[in-house]
Image: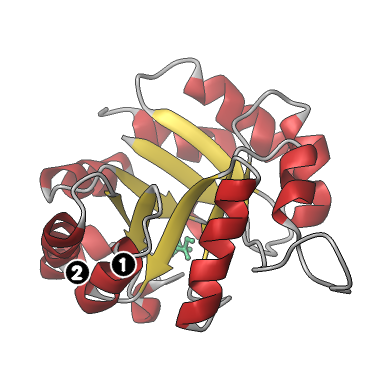
Amino acid sequence: MFVLVNLKTYPCEPVAVAEAVRDVDESTDARLAVAPQAAHLERVAETGVETWAQHVDPVEHGSNTGHTLAESVADAGAVGTLINHSEQRLKLADIDGSVRAAERAGLETVVCANNPEQIGAAAALGPDAVAVEPPELIGTGTPVSQADPDIVEGAVSAAEAVDDDVSVLCGAGISTGEDVVSADDLGAEGVLLASGVAKADDPRAALEDLVDPL
Ligand SMILES: O=C(CO)COP(=O)(O)O
C-alpha cells in the first residue's frame, strides 16, 4: 500500500513529520511519502523522505507570476505531485495541463476527484494514479473506507474501465491501520491522508499505528 501524507497548510513541523515518515517507511513494506507546502519541499526532501508537491500549475517556464512550476518542485526534490485536490480544484483543461507539466518534469502524478464519475474522467487523462476523496468526509475522522465503501469500489471499477494501468487511492478521514486495511480490501492501492498525522499530538506514533497491520 502507498500511504501519502498531505500536510496541507496545517501548523505542523514539516521536517519533524518528514523524518517520522522516513523512519516509519524503513520499518514497513508499505510505501510512505509526504506532501508539504511548496516552500518546505527542499527542507523536507533533504531528510531523505519520498517528497511530493501538493499541486503544480499547467504552465511552462515564462511569465506566470505566482504559479507553481513543475520543474521547480522537481528541482526542490519532489518526485511526484497531487493535482486537483478538493481544496485546489482545477478546470478539466487545467488538470490535463498540470498532468502534462508534471510528466514533462518527470514527476509522478495523482489526480484527485470527488466520486467514481470524476475518477473515470481523471483516469482518461493518463495520470499514474487517481485518488477518490469525498469532500464531505475530509478532515472528519470518519474514514471513507468505512463510511462510504461503495465510492471506493466504484472508483476502482471506474478507473479500471478506462485504463487499468492507473492505480486508485482513496482518502478522507483515514487515521488508523484498520482504515488502511479496509481501503486495501476495497481494491485501493493506497491512501491519501492528512489530519490523522499532521494534527496528531505524536505524528510518529500515528504513522506507526497506520502501517502496523500492513
Ligand atoms: O484531503 C485529504 C488528503 O489529501 C484527507 O484529509 P483528512 O485525512 O484530514 O481527512
Q: Amino acid at mark 1?
A: Thr
Residue 210, horizontal then vertical, whole percent = 37, 38
User: Is the distance from the Cβ of mark 1 to the nearest ligand 1 atom less than 8 Å?
Assistant: no
Direction from residue 5 to residue 118 in the image, left or right = left
Judge the density around disc 1: few (<14), some (14-19), many (≥20) Cα neighbours within 10 Å.
some
Residue 48, horizontal then vertical, whole percent = 69, 23
Quarter of image, res 78: top right
Q: Amino acid at mark 2?
A: Ala
Indicate how the structure is coloured in the image: secondary structure
Does any portion of residue 46 appear in the rendered image?
yes
Judge the density around disc 2: few (<14), some (14-19), many (≥20) Cα neighbours within 10 Å.
few
Nearer to me, 161 or 156: 161
In the depicted structure, whether residue 13 falls above or below residue 118: above
In the depicted structure, whether residue 17 falls above or below residue 19: below
Mark 1 and 2 residues: CB-CB less than 8 Å, in contact? Answer: yes
In the depicted structure, whether residue 95 falls above or below residue 52: below
* Label located before the other in sequence (1 or 2): 1
Quarter placement of the N terminus: top left
Direction from residue 75 to residue 57 in the image, left or right = left
x 55%, y 48%: residue: 103
- Residue at far top of view: 27
Quarter placement of the C terminus: top left
Residue 117, horizontal then vertical, whole percent = 22, 77
Q: Secondary structure at mark 1?
A: loop
Q: Secondary structure at mark 2?
A: helix
Q: Which residue is mark 2?
A: 147
Which numbered marker is on residue 165? none
Cα separation, mark 1 vs mark 2, equals 7 Å
x 35%, y 57%: residue: 130
Which numbered marker is on residue 142? 1
x 89%, y 74%: residue: 65
Residue 148, horizontal then vertical, whole percent = 17, 70
